[in-house]
Image (spheres, rainbow, N blue to C red):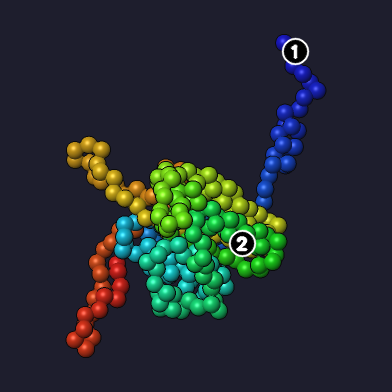
Amino acid sequence: MAKDKSFDLENFLNEENEESSVEYNEQKYVILHEEFQKAIGLKGIMLGDMSMGYGLSDSGKTEFMLHVAKAATLQDILPILIITENKFKEDRLSNFGLTNKNCLVKRNMKYLEDVYDYISQIIYKVKKKELRKDVIILWDSVASTPSKETMEIDKEGKIKKKYGPQKNAAVIGYYNPIMMDLVTSTREKDCEHQVGVYMVNQCYVKPPEFAGAMATLVPNGGEKIWYNLSLTVEFKEGQRLKAKKDGVDYAFGLVTR
């Protein structure tokens, strides 16, 4: 067959690549302590990306999130804390110097869909320059938040369960790709500031698949929760730090791996 001399592959590729290319600004971080940088190999929690920290109860997940929020306030980054974890204590914020003057705390969202909508609205305000700040959104916790269709309360106050955990996983799997696309778009050249999302998640222990194998920690939300994350951090409880003052024992910290 004769070669079509009217077709120039190089020109075609150049034109297609030029149309599809997107220029990005340099990656920004909420810069964390040197110990974290050594463990992870990154400066901190990334802006313009989605990340997740997961672990069993009392393994240091929320404590770490508050460290990120505190670090953000010292780096001219606005931390927005979305609290859907019912056991979260308000005094934990003040212990880290987090107030309504240096951060935003949202506690009025009941459902996964509400949280995702709110994050989308914050990104919209940043891109439209209505909010002229780099932002880190810290959500504690995705596992504690039901979807709208998971349950309902009838007229007598009884809880009627409609779907199981699979529904929550399906909602997370649907929204996370959309959210990752929106978050990543804040790194594009025409966007003045960047938005990062860090989700705190619970997990369960998966039994070993065969004799001699190790049990593993699996984050809630199904397999799809991994797909759109740029960083995941697994927390394992270590030694609790204790001291005695005036004859009273205090637990004041936690070493986590």
Question: Mark 2 or mark 1, which is nearer to you?
Answer: 2
Q: Is residue 42 visible?
A: no
Residue at position x 51%, y 62% in the image:
109
Q: Could you say which is closer to the camera, residue 84 or residue 130?
A: 84
User: Is 178 on the left or on the right of 144, as rendered?
Assistant: right
* Image quadrant where one finds the C terminus: bottom left
Identify the secondary structure beneath mark 1. Answer: loop
Corner quadrant of residue 34: bottom left
Corner quadrant of residue 38: bottom left
Name the residue type under label 2.
Answer: Ile
Residue at position x 58%, y 59% in the image:
118
Relative image position of residue 178 (x, y in whole percent): 58, 47
User: Is 171 on the left or on the right of 123, as rendered?
Assistant: left
* Cα distance between the residues tagged 2 and 1: 57 Å
The residue to which callout 2 is attached is 122
Q: Earlier in the sequence, mark 2 or mark 1?
A: 1
User: Is 152 on the left or on the right of 78, as rendered?
Assistant: left
Decide: few, some or many residues near mark 1? Use Cα within 10 Å; few <14, some 14-19, many ≥20: few
Relative image position of residue 138 (x, y in whole percent): 49, 63
Query: Label for residue 119?
Result: none
Q: Is residue 95 above or below residue 43?
A: below
The residue to which callout 1 is attached is 2
Relative image position of residue 50 (x, y in whole percent): 51, 54
Residue at position x 37%, y 59% in the image:
39
Q: Is residue 11 above or below residue 251?
A: above
Identify the secondary structure beneath mark 2. Answer: helix
Name the residue type under label 1.
Answer: Ala
Residue found at the far top of this picture: 1
Q: Are marks 2 and 1 in contact (CB under 8 Å)?
A: no
Q: Could you say which is closer to the camera, residue 156 or residue 97?
A: 156
